[in-house]
Amino acid sequence: MTFIKTISEEQAQGLTRDQYQAAQKNLSYVPNYIKAFSLHSDVYDAWTKLIGAIRSKIRLRRYELVTFAAAMALECRYCMLAHGAVLRKNFFSAEQLAAIVKDFRNAGLSPEEVAMMSFAQKVTSQASKICEHDIEELRGHGLSDEEILDVVLASAARNFFSKTLDATGTMPDHAYQELEPELLELLNLGRLSPN
């Protein structure tokens, strides 16, 4: 599940136990990403507050596309599977989502969505090279400065979470096996299937 030890559900106490119980209640299982933070459950608690504040300001489709773009740039299969599953459930067919993974610029998304995803990837891989022109391009697609900041925050937050999961060797959850086989393979970056 991870390269580092985690606290089992049987041994969990205090905040860790509360987080595990909340996940069990909401998802019917405790995701590996929560277990990855179990040695520092206060950090996971802070993360949920941070990402909750970011998500409260941005529409679900926009948040998921931006987050997915950042996860693709990071090659984080856990986050690609998790957010790909949300996009699949709420917005796209398996074929549409596969097209987004292969080339989101030519997958039938709106010009605004393509611009946001491109920007999210630049935030992820080349934030120091972002210039006024990049911001003006998003404004040209109708985004306000507040909405542009939403994209920046969602992208930057994904870097923290994805890198934490990858650096700890956190394996994606078995729940993602429910995705269509071709999509599962694409989102899983051709690696072993989720456990």
Image: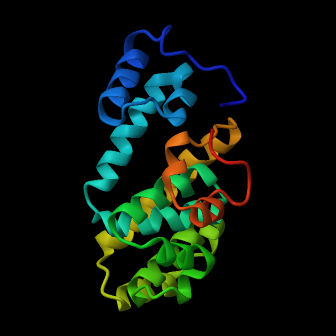
For this rendering, which residue is in front, 31 or 123?
31
What is the x, y in percent for residue 188? Answer: 65, 56
Name the residue located 40 percent from the left edge and 15 percent from the top edge.
17
Name the residue located 43 percent from the left edge and 18 percent from the top edge.
16
What is the x, y in percent for residue 110? Answer: 39, 87
Query: Would you identify the image quadrant in which residue 58 lies?
Result: bottom left
For this rendering, which residue is in front, 43 or 127?
43
- Report how many numbered discs are placed on residues in the image: 0
Q: Is residue 21 left or right of residue 11?
A: left
Query: Would you identify the image quadrant in which residue 87 lies?
Result: bottom left
Q: Is residue 14 left or right of residue 67?
A: left
Name the residue located 37 percent from the left edge and 31 percent from the top edge.
28
Q: Is residue 130 above or below residue 80?
A: below
What is the x, y in percent for residue 153? Answer: 42, 59
Q: Quadrant of the N terminus?
A: top right
Name the residue located 53 percent from the left edge and 62 percent from the top edge.
180
What is the x, y in percent for residue 115? Answer: 47, 83
* Colour mapping: rainbow
Q: Quadrant of the C terminus?
A: top right
Q: Is residue 122 above or below residue 185?
A: below
Q: Is residue 112 left or right of residue 98?
A: left
